[in-house]
Amino acid sequence: MKINFKNKVNWHREIGCGTFLFIIMTAALAQCQGTVVSVTGPTAPPNPASGFDAELAVGTSLAGVSWLSQTAFSNVTISVDLQGNPGAAGMAFLMTKIGSGTTTANQYAESSFAFPTASSLTPVFSGLHLGVGQYFLIIQQTTNGTTGNGAWLGSSSPMVTSAAAVSATGEYSYSGSIPGYAPDSPFGRGLTTYYDYTVASVPEPSAVGLIPLGGAVITWRWRRNRIHCEKC
């Protein structure tokens, strides 16, 4: 078998390009899957800030958490550890700002949900694309005490897990008269991240399909160059 210098250079170039392509695809897939940020731990009884107790009015307290991300994630699901009486319902707000002066212009998404009767991580958002920035998740109970109360459970010893360049940045609570737009309430800042929640990203089917496709392309190009070299 004879391999001239030019073919040898081309062969090494193909291998290098193929390896680079595989690394890029693998890195892209890793970025779009897995845990973004998660706070879990031994469940403790709800403290007053995490319980949305109400008598005859809609829940008189709000609770929230926030995280800061220096990278973007796709196909994100946000789940919260909730529990409540049958019939209890609420709203979830995903914001880029909270507190006095907040408007719907600062809202990224909102959704309604039902409190489960047994403690469980309940998805409140799915299919989101989250860019770089700080996000605030606010939970509001929308039923009164007669219909059913709920709670956002937490841990007295939270364990925080996060992707690279992502960090949990605290918890927020408010109790009192809630304005027409809940995220506009004057929240107090907690010292630790207490409430249990998980923000996770899963790969799109198209992204997963790129890995075997890229591998097939690399294999085809390698075999083509090998056959070409054998003919030289």
Image (spheres, rainbow, N blue to C red):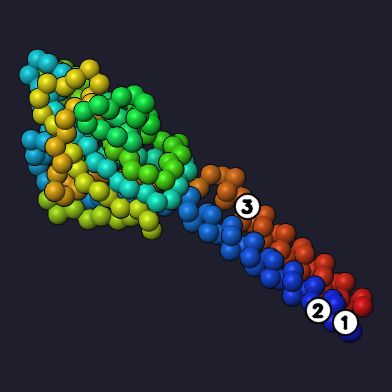
User: Eyeballing the image, is 58 above or below 189?
Assistant: above
User: Between tags 3 and 1, which lies in front?
Assistant: 1
The amino acid sitting under disc 2 is Lys
Residue picked out by circle 3: 210
Mark 1 residue type: Asn
Q: Residue furthest bottom?
A: 1
In the rendered image, which quarter is residue 17 located in? bottom right
Instruction: Identify the mark at residue 4; answer none if there is no mark.
Output: 1
101 or 70: nearer the eye?
101
Residue 154 place in picture, x, y as percent: 17, 44
Residue 139 in view in this figure: no
Q: Are marks 1 and 2 in contact (CB under 8 Å)?
A: yes
Marks 3/2: CA–CA distance = 28 Å
Q: Position of 48 compared to 40: left or right? A: left
Under mark 3, the amino acid is Leu
Q: Residue at x 92, y 76 (%)?
A: 231
- Quadrant for the N terminus in the image: bottom right
Give me the residue at 43% from left, 50% from top.
71
The mark found on residue 166 in the picture is none
The label on residue 8 is 2
The spot of residue 49 in percent (x, y) is 11, 36
Q: Is tag 3's residue or tag 2's residue first in the polypeptide sequence?
A: 2
Quadrant of residue 215 in the image?
Answer: bottom right
Which residue shows up at 60% across the image and 45% down it?
A: 206
Q: Quadrant of residue 8?
A: bottom right
Q: Secondary structure at mark 2?
A: helix
Distance in Å between CA atoms under marks 1 and 2: 6 Å
For the residue carrying disc 3, how many other residues have a C-alpha within 10 Å: few (<14), some (14-19), or many (20+)? some
Above or below residue 50? Residue 22 is below
